[in-house]
Amino acid sequence: MATAIVPPGGRVQGARLDRRNDAMMKQIQATHAPDGCEVDVKALIHVIEDIMHCSTLPIPGLGLPPVSTSQVQLDASEDLTVQNDFTNMLELLAYPIDRISCEIAWNCLGGSDAHTTTLAVFNTLSSYSWEAKVVITFAAFAVNYGEFWLVAQLYPSNPLAKSVALLKQLPDMLEHADSLKPKFEALINLIKAMLDVTKCIMVTAKSHTAIYWTIRSIVACVSQIKNFIGMGHKYIASTTEAWELSSLPHMVNNIYSHLQKQLALCYQHIDEKRYIEAFQMLVSVIETAHIDNKKTVKSLIYAKDDQLTLVDGSNKKRVSIDVLSRKYVLLIISDLDVFHEEHFILDQMYTESRQNRTRPESQYEVVWFPVLDRTIPWNDAKQQKFKAIQASMPWFSLYHPLVDPAVIKYIKEYWHFKKKPLLVVLDQHGKLVNRNAIHMMWIWESMAFPFTSLKEEALWKETTWSIELLADSIDQSIVNWTVDRKYICLYGGEDLEWIRKFTNTAKDVAKAAGITLEMLYVGKSNPREKVRKISNTILGEKLSHILSDPTLIWFFWVRLESMWHSKMQHGKSVENDLIMQEIMTIMSFDGSEQGWAVISHGTAEIAKAKGDNMLTSLTKYEDWKDHANEVGFVNALIENLEGLRTPHHCNRLILPGTTGSIPEKVVCAECGRPMDKFIMYRCCTD
């Protein structure tokens, strides 16, 4: 930055002005001959600031405002606790401060122009750093300025001050304070600008131009004070002096604005560097083995040792992260918007697991870890929403939701958090064992502990396709019906007329076959208002059982999706896995516009079909009832449904885009041929 004052009386062309500025800066730089002795003068800024503030307190007849400066943060060296170092620094600078004070005063009284006096200051301070030059000069001015106002303030009450004031002609000046007030206001404006720039210079890269104009402004201020003392109210500044005093604040403020921009860029660069370093450190900590999990947890939930950063859901008290030490930690990663259903189901599972703490699968702690968009301002509404969710949780949660940006970056990039909640698992050593155990939790609940891939594989080896796998977690009635050896029918869809026909026909067939059939409506994978109304109608007309809460309908389908995702993770498909085939069949039923049903008895016999085929088969029960008496009702129904299958069919499989990677190839669960793949965007407010 190059700036120069153009005196009135003519304009200097841009190129000529630049050459003049360049020559002036070269002249200043030529005076710089540091001797290698570094002096930390930043603490001296506080003393100067105090003098400037106290020196301009209002006095009778003048009513000037105190100097108030912009808050520019200095670094840790501004702490004055190390008094010895500060005292030593003052002793070292006492002589140069006094010398500069005398030199500026002498030059001003001797009629030297401002640039010559400024250049003399640079020559005297040639051995000091650039920052020290400006602070020492400012300190020299502060001494004279402070003495001037000290005498002025004590003059009415202190005999010594009164005598000194008489010699300085201050009484005459103060008697005509009104006429001098504009000059003092201009002086104060310039001092404020000088102080702002000086503080900014301490934390930015060296700016020779800024330092030059700050020192030159100090020279102008000293000149004004000396003239006030010498001539009092009779002093009339020359045109150049008046113009310089009025223009310098504007110029110095422009320099300050420029330095502030540099400082902002500097802080941005520092923040970015710290952000990258924090992110890299987090990656290193999580990927490194530790004796316990404390270091990993602390790197995610940043906390000083004296902070209580968690809230215990059982008693709503704040606790430290020590409560998680040497335990498996399940982090529920979510935002504030999509958490109702997951919260409801997890709450039930967590409460059940806590009922018997001696069971191995109960030896873990759950922590809600909100991940919020830091670009959106935090407000009272969000705070109240966060507190409401937090208050409803039986597990631990973060006391404050604003997580470190580096942690958010890690969660999004390494754990692939987007919108759907994750259940991240850390073992007792802080090692990541599962980026998202939510699918295992939905399928097997706490039996999936410790939620590793090996445990998941072992559980699948022990699992066969049955009505228990399909639905027993959603309603206790299913478990009771299975124990009582009842026939169980699960059905869904949104065609109410088909539902009426199907349920009434199924009841008639069950009565004719002499079997006890229990039916349960499980809706669709997106339990909208229409499904709720259908459930109420089914209940009102006593067509069948329904699930007591719409969230349980959601859970039935999300659990099925979790099975699909889990199987996909282990490389299973319709071609090589029977359970996968059955899962895909039920999911394709849900993609159809019509209803569907499965009927089961025992652990392995399951008949399934779309609505029309199932209704047709039951309507023609008389045609296959004898065979049912021979092989059993469900087996006979399965065979009859096979006979109704035609080469012509249309199956749709809707896979949620947020459950994991979408396979390139999916075959039809009915005929085994590859299905065509389409992309669907859906907005449904029903």
Image (cartoon, rainbow, N blue to C red):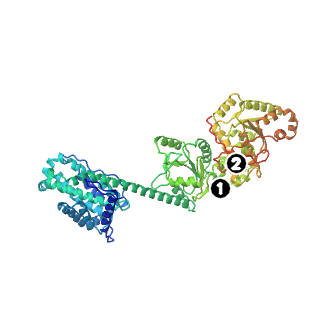
Give the amino acid type for the residue marked by disc 2 in the picture.
Trp
Q: Is residue 619 above or below residue 116?
A: above
Name the quadrant of the C terminus: top right
Q: Residue furthest top?
A: 541
The residues tagged by marks 1 and 2 sit, at their Cα atoms, a distance apart of 17 Å
Q: Report the front residue among 282 and 260.
A: 260
Label 2 crowding class (10 Å Cα cut-off): few <14, some 14-19, many 20+? Answer: many
* Image spot of residue 412 (x, y percent): 57, 52
Give the amino acid type for the residue marked by disc 1 in the picture.
Thr
Q: Is residue 276 above or below residue 538?
A: below
SS category of the residue bearing label 1: loop
Label 1 crowding class (10 Å Cα cut-off): few <14, some 14-19, many 20+? Answer: some
Q: Is residue 452 visible?
A: yes
Q: Report the front residue among 170 and 336.
A: 170
Please name the residue shown 27% across and 52% down the image: 247
Reading the image, the residue beneath label 2 is: 564
* Image spot of residue 36 (x, y percent): 33, 71
Reading the image, the residue beneath label 1 is: 452
Please name the residue shown 18% across and 45% down the image: 178
Please name the residue shown 26% across and 49% down the image: 66
Q: Which badge, 1 or 2, comes first in the chain's sequence?
A: 1
The label shown at residue 333 is none
